Image (cartoon, rainbow, N blue to C red):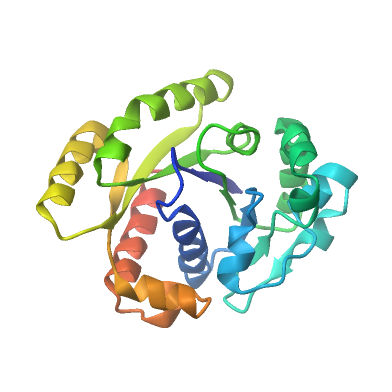
């Protein structure tokens, strides 16, 4: 089983969109995939157009059985929302989520024969990202080709250093999302490509098909398999597994 923690230094970079669409591309390849939301905003459920149900916060705070918090989607992959308690008991959830509880959760999931588990985490260095990254094989960072992402590289480096101190075997990769067809975006793409080198899996273009797919609560590839985002994301998934 391959646990993957998807992270970012700031919000609004399309991290949840990347996570959901990656899960869809994996199941299309016949890989049994579970997507787990750890952010109190419950963005995965909202993207999927699903009612927020029991999820990870119920597992963390009251030991709700793992099988009860896993929900199926019509797209082939399963998901775990952050859950109802994450909204009504936010502080307590963020205090009590930890490495050992995620380890126990993954132990349960492994017995269900999931091959890949994707954790969608809140932006920045938070308890959920620490708890999941310390149990992951891969950390996948989502950046944009802009000045703020470039400036945040030092912050990201410090965050990753903390993780690697406790989990030295973890591998870190990045994707650039929402690349706009402007000279500024291209310049920062070159800068980030130079800095990240082999850790950069690829770039996802700004694509109106993404907005349409989000509006229809479905993966981009389901909405339009020929969309640039869908085509490039499939290449990124191939690049990721080629490096394992």
For image coordinates 71% across by 71% down, the residue present is: 51
Q: Residue furthest top?
A: 165
For image coordinates 70% across by 32% down, the residue present is: 99
Locate residue 213 relative to residue 96 in the image: left or right: left
Q: Which one is nearer the viewer's eye here, 117 or 228?
A: 228
For image coordinates 45% across by 34% down, the residue present is: 171
> Measured from the top left, where is residue 40 in percent x and y?
66, 49
Q: Is residue 22 above or below residue 157?
A: below
Q: Which one is nearer the viewer's eye here, 28 or 202?
A: 202
> Measured from the top left, where is residue 65 in percent x and y?
87, 54
Locate residue 193 relative to residue 217 in the image: left or right: left
> Measured from the top left, where is residue 7 in percent x and y?
49, 43
How many labels sit on residues? 0
Please indicate, yes or no, whether residue 136 appears anywhere in the rendered image.
Answer: yes
Location of residue 5 by image quarter: top right
Locate residue 92 relative to residue 48 in the image: left or right: right
Location of residue 50 by image quarter: bottom right
Specify the quadrant that holds the C terminus: top left
> Measured from the top left, where is residue 181 in percent x and y?
15, 60
Q: Is residue 45 above or below residue 213?
A: above
Please indicate, yes or no, whether residue 33 appears anywhere in the rendered image.
Answer: no
Location of residue 153 by image quarter: top left
């Amino acid at each position: 089983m391959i646990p993957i923690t998807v992270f970012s230094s700031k919000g609004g970079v399309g991290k949840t969109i990347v996570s959901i669409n990656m899960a869809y591309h994996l199941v299309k390849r016949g890989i049994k995939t579970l997507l787990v939301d750890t952010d109190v905003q419950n963005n995965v459920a909202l993207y999927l157009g699903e009612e927020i149900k029991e999820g990870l916060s119920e597992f963390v705070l009251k030991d709700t059985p793992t099988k009860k918090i896993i929900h199926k989607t019509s797209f082939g992959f399963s998901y775990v929302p952050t859950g109802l308690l994450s909204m009504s008991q936010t502080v307590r959830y963020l205090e009590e989520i930890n490495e050992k509880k995620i380890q126990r959760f993954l132990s349960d999931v492994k017995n269900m024969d999931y091959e890949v588990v994707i954790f969608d985490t809140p932006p920045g260095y938070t308890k959920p990202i620490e708890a999941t990254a310390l149990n992951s094989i891969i950390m996948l960072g989502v950046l944009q080709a802009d000045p703020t992402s470039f400036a945040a590289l030092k912050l990201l480096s410090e965050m990753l250093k903390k993780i690697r101190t406790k989990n030295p075997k973890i591998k870190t990769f990045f994707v650039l999302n929402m690349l706009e067809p402007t000279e500024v975006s291209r310049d920062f793409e070159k800068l980030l490509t130079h800095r990240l080198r082999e850790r950069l899996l690829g770039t996802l273009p700004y694509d109106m098909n993404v907005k349409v797919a989000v509006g229809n609560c479905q993966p981009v590839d389901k909405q339009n398999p020929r969309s640039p985002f869908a085509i490039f994301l499939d290449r990124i998934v191939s690049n990721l597994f080629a490096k394992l």
